[in-house]
Amino acid sequence: MTAPQSTLPRLLIATGNAGKVDEFRDLLAGCGWQVVAPNEIGLALAVEETGATYLENANLKAAAFSKASGLAALADDSGLEVDALDGEPGPLHHDGGWDGGDQAERIQILLDALKDVPAERRTARFRTVIVVLLPDGRRIEATGACEGVIAAAAVGDAGFGYDPVFYLPAEGMTMAELGLAAKNRLSHRAAAAAAISAELRALANQ
């Protein structure tokens, strides 16, 4: 016997990052849409992030995935903004030499850039913009931010990106040490996703 098909409208998460897809599944639970990953519909798509802002990049990805699939697509663009580095890596990290070959290398590039910066000047924030583009051209968007400090060394093995060096003073630990439930309560993506989830519920009820 085959499993019954969901009657919910489908929402494609516009990323090949499995960790991000899992995070959005949790963040959007109860939104009234069936969250699907590109590989679940046989889609493999790479979108060059040529925008100068988070919003531009999110729009590029949402448009490309929605066009390729015919589905509503959700895309986000997020970045780390370090005050002592004049807001870098930021949305232009791909062009600024911050990316490295993998997560460990990216983190090391950041720590090297901050090696002479004292703790009190290592303030930073994660910022995100989420865009949902519907096949009929309607679009919704939301933003979120999470304030913290760049730690002197990576700690924790959960999360992804810069999470191991993003220290949350109020929690006494890095983002990578938080459990998923706590991260989904505190993160920049959680703040934006909460607003998007409310909009999605309204759309699903139309």
Image (cartoon, rainbow, N blue to C red):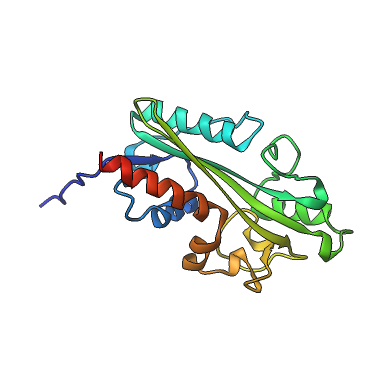
Q: Where in the figure is residue 113, as x and y percent of width and height? A: 83, 52
Q: Residue at x 28, y 42 (%)?
A: 204
Q: Where in the figure is residue 127, as x and y percent of width and height? A: 62, 48
Quarter location, residue 143: top right
Q: Where in the figure is residue 119, as x and y percent of width and height? A: 82, 65
Say if residue 61 shows up in the picture.
yes
Of residues 19 and 91, which is closer to you in this image? 91
Of residues 197 and 46, which is closer to you in this image? 197
Q: Where 184 sits versus 205, above or below?
A: below
Of residues 153 and 102, which is closer to you in this image? 153
Q: Where in the figure is residue 69, as x and y percent of width and height? A: 35, 30
Residue at the right extreme, as displayed: 116
Q: Residue at x 33, y 38 (%)?
A: 41
Q: Residue at x 79, y 59 (%)?
A: 122
- Classify residue 144 as left or right of residue 3: right
Say if residue 46 shows up in the picture.
no
Looking at the rendering, in which quadrant would you find the C terminus? top left
- Classify residue 97 as left or right of residue 23: right
Quarter location, residue 148: bottom right
- Classify residue 48 as left or right of residue 202: right
Quarter location, residue 91: top right
Residue at the bottom extreme, as displayed: 172
> Number of marks in the image?
0
Q: Where 87 sits versus 165, above or below?
A: above
